[in-house]
Amino acid sequence: MASKRGRLDQFIARRLQVSKKAVRQLLIDNKVSVDGKYAKSPDLLIDEFSHIVCNDVVLQQYEKQYYMLNKPDGVVSATVDDKHPTAVSLLVGVELDMLHIAGRLDLHSTGLLLITNDAKWSAALMAPDNKVDKHYIVTLANPIDERYIDAFANGMYFEYEDITTLPATLTMLSSHQARVSLCEGKYHQIKRMFGRFRNPVVGLHRESIGKIVLDNTLLPGEFRLLTEAEIDCVIQ
């Protein structure tokens, strides 16, 4: 989801259904303020979070929102779905307008989901060039061994897309469970990598994205606002 930037005069003309000439007069008469300051330039660039007031009437006042959700099994990472409950629908009491998910999880995967209305922030978080590590606890149907560690570290070639995955770190936690860390998110990547060993993934739980770690006090389905430190740790 891209950030919505545009000219101030176009926004006011569209919102008030007046001509751009009329908008210019409003600006001359100090009738328009943007983020608490009188606006003079009709081509001033604004975005969806610019606080815009005209003739003491608020035309736009969206606030940036950032949430972490402990996604339960059976919830789809979407804003709307006809068959399953959505992650966004679990944010009870929250204004849902413009919210989107930064880094989706499969239907039966669980753990950390980040939900925001700040497109610039989420784009930075998910940008491949930023190489933000994501950490998962993976439970397998069959035992794992040392071969998996080297295979994940060396990357795997997927012929269908003609790509080789970036090196990933696999740490064995038990005979059937591992922690996997990677900085990309190809389609069903973790399941497909274990699939090379014909070892089905029976559980996938995301612990963290970059420096943002799932709050261990959140039960499945619960959410909270991100702290300022968590928001600021994303490079924009």
Image (spheres, rainbow, N blue to C red):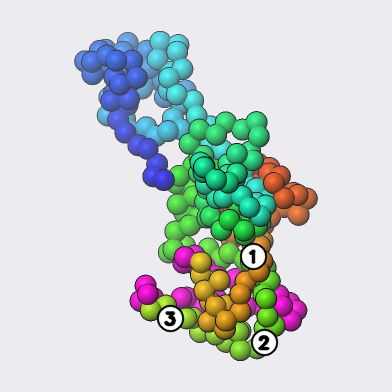
Q: CA distance from mark 1 to mark 2?
A: 18 Å
The residue wearing badge 3 is 157
Q: Is residue 164 magenta?
A: yes
Left or right for 180, reference 177: left
State the mark number for residue 145. Answer: 2
Residue 48 location, x and y as percent? 42, 33
Farthest right residue in view: 217
Three-letter amino acid code at the position of disc 1: Leu
Q: Is residue 161 magenta?
A: yes
Q: Secondary structure at mark 2?
A: loop
Q: Regarding mark 3 in the picture, which secondary structure is present there?
A: strand
Q: Quadrant of residue 169?
A: bottom right
Could you tell me the amino acid type at mark 3?
Tyr
Above or below, 72 relative to 14: below
**Residue stretch in magenta:** 160-187
Q: At numbered mark 1, what does the secondary structure look like: helix, strand or loop?
A: strand
Q: CA distance from mark 3 to mark 1?
A: 22 Å
Q: Position of residue 67 (x, y in %)?
A: 61, 43
Which quadrant of the view contains residue 161? bottom left
Residue under the point 47% across and 81% down: 156
Neighbour class for label 3 at 10 Å: few (<14), some, many (≥20)? Answer: few
Q: Which mark is residue 11?
A: none
- Give the residue drawn at x 69%, y 46%: 221
- Quickly name the residue at label 1: 204
Residue lying at 71% horizontally and 78% vertically, measured from the top left: 176
In terms of depth relative to the viewer, which is nearer, 106 or 36?
Answer: 106
On the rendered structure, is 162 left or right of 172?
left
Sequence-wise first label, 1 or 2? 2
Q: Residue furthest bottom?
A: 147
Figure disc tally: 3
* Three-letter code for the amino acid on which mark 2 is drawn: Asp
